[in-house]
Amino acid sequence: MSDTPFQVFEGLTLEASLNVEDAQIAENVRYAIRQQHPQAWPHPPQADRVCLVGGGPSLDDTLPELVALLNEGARLVTVNGSYQWCLERNLRPTAQIVVDARQSNARFLEPYIPACRYFLASQCHPDSWDAVQGRQYVAIFHSAAPDNATLKPILDEYYLNTWAPVSGGSTVILRAISLLRVMGYLRFDLFGVDSCFLGDAHHAYPQAENDADKRYKVRTCPTGRPDLARDFWVTPWHLAQADDFIRFVKYEGDHFLLNVHGNGLLAYLLASGAEVPLDPST
Amino acid sequence: MTSIADLERDTYDAMWELPQYQGEPSPGAQFAPLFSTIALPRSTVLDAGCGNGKGALTLASQGFSVYTCDISSAGLPPIWPLPFFQAAVWDDLTGWNDGTYDWVYCCNVLEHLPPQFTMLAVSQMLRIATHGVFLTVSTQPDGLGIWIGKSLRPTVQGFTWWRDSLRELSIVFEARDLVGAAVFVLEGRAT
């Protein structure tokens, strides 16, 4: 998580912070590491293509592209609510990844799908760990920088200094890419990763937590090409996520191949080279 | 006819002749500090597969009452100050101390056993442990057996294989994946 406040618009700054207090995260980690699960650990490069599915509103539009890639043998990896979205469409995830430490995220681990791999961050709430108790394939990973002041002492002591940090990015999708990269995967197709509204929808499925978010209209274009400008409706967290995503790609982009599907802000930014819009057009 | 145990003894008699093997770090000594946070002071401990004895001596220096056994005594110093009996760890291990111990301590031994004897060995340890069995295993192939033309770790398995197999035998209080190694603490069965 970046400590640098993000200038969204003139007069509006978004300061990133964890949605759970450090003390609660430490308590969650102490519980998680005692659940007897294997740690996710660096693997040699894997040739498989990964369809990583977020919850953005473009999912419905890009479903045929997703199905086509899966039929070609790509692995389906979901995060949070996209797990249920895929199951409702008879798409069986190879893996489900949950990072968030809040108790409510345990709902993203139902129903149980045999042969699905469940990757939970050690900071996940005990209810999330209880939800996967007894499942065949569950692994723990540590969503933290190597020098994380909260987690490092706990993990060093328990694992006798043998733990692998999965760092980079403030959202579950970015952490999922980092995790999958650590596990050797290099080729990613992203679905439902938009960082904007499409129509009135902030997600492809109901997510009441975001219904009251304030919306802004922004315009962006590649440098010197106003004719290619596009307007997007966003929340401040959409823009922060987009900015974080672009910085992540600039910093880590040599380590993987990325193809963002859909017609959202992120796909536009990556395809056009436009900057993250910082000025509201209305 | 030569038994599998005899072949194993010959293997380790040969290995302990090699300076490279003698110079390997001792897992028994490495994990002793962790064990001392779990077991009560002055507990009786059988170091099963004690190797060069460094782990047993470390435990003794921490105040445990330590007994030792191994399939080969070739790794031990000529003068060995702790009780020792020679046995494969899948044998009956009731050699000393009225046949039971508070703890059995077995570090990086099971992966050296033929696969068919690994869980038998754990069962033998559980039979003689009143409090528990402290196990560590390496989950990586060895690099030294090449000196005598064979693998020293015929049972290289992943963390979940060991965890799930051990759960069939006892309550697993603790299972830590140290990536490349694993630590397990099992409830003993002896009364």
Image: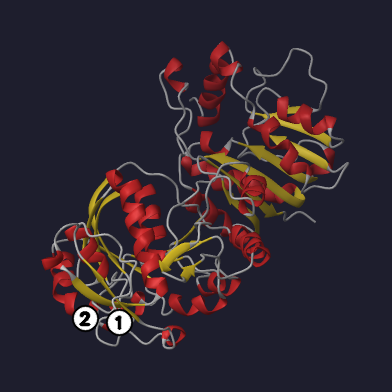
Quadrant location of the C terminus of chain B in the rendered image: bottom right
Judged left or right of residue A197, residue B169 is: right
Residue receiving disc 1: A204
Between residue B104 and residue A282, name the one nearer to us. A282
Between residue A34 and residue A120, name the one nearer to us. A120
Mark 2 to mark 1: distance in Å?
7 Å
Depicted A138 relative to depicted A86: above or below: above
Between residue A200 and residue B187, name the one nearer to us. A200
Q: Residue B120, which numbered label?
A: none
| Chain identity of mark 1 | A
Which picture quadrant has residue A162?
top right
Between residue A192 and residue B101, name the one nearer to us. A192
| Marks 2 and 1, the one that precedes in the sequence | 2
| Amino acid type assigned to the residue bearing label 1 in the image | Ala
Query: What residue appears at the point 20 percent right and 67 percent down from the top-left corner?
Result: A261
Secondary element at tag 1: loop
Same chain letter for marks 2 and 1: yes
**Residue A208: % across, % down:** 44, 88
Depicted A55 relative to depicted A7: above or below: below
Query: What residue appears at the point 61 percent right and 16 percent down from the top-left corner?
Result: B22
Depicted B119 relative to depicted B6: above or below: below
**Residue A81: % across, % down:** 38, 77
Which picture quadrant has residue A231?
bottom left
Query: What residue appears at the point 48 percent right and 43 percent down from the top-left corner?
Result: B116
Residue receiving disc 2: A60
**Res A184 seen here:** no
For the image shown, how many numbered marks are present on the structure? 2
How packed mark 1 is, by other alpha carbons closer than 10 Å (few <14, some 14-19, many 20 or more), is some
| Amino acid type assigned to the residue bearing label 2 in the image | Asp
- Do the CB atoms of the residues marked 2 and 1 lie less than 8 Å apart? yes
**Res B78 seen here:** yes
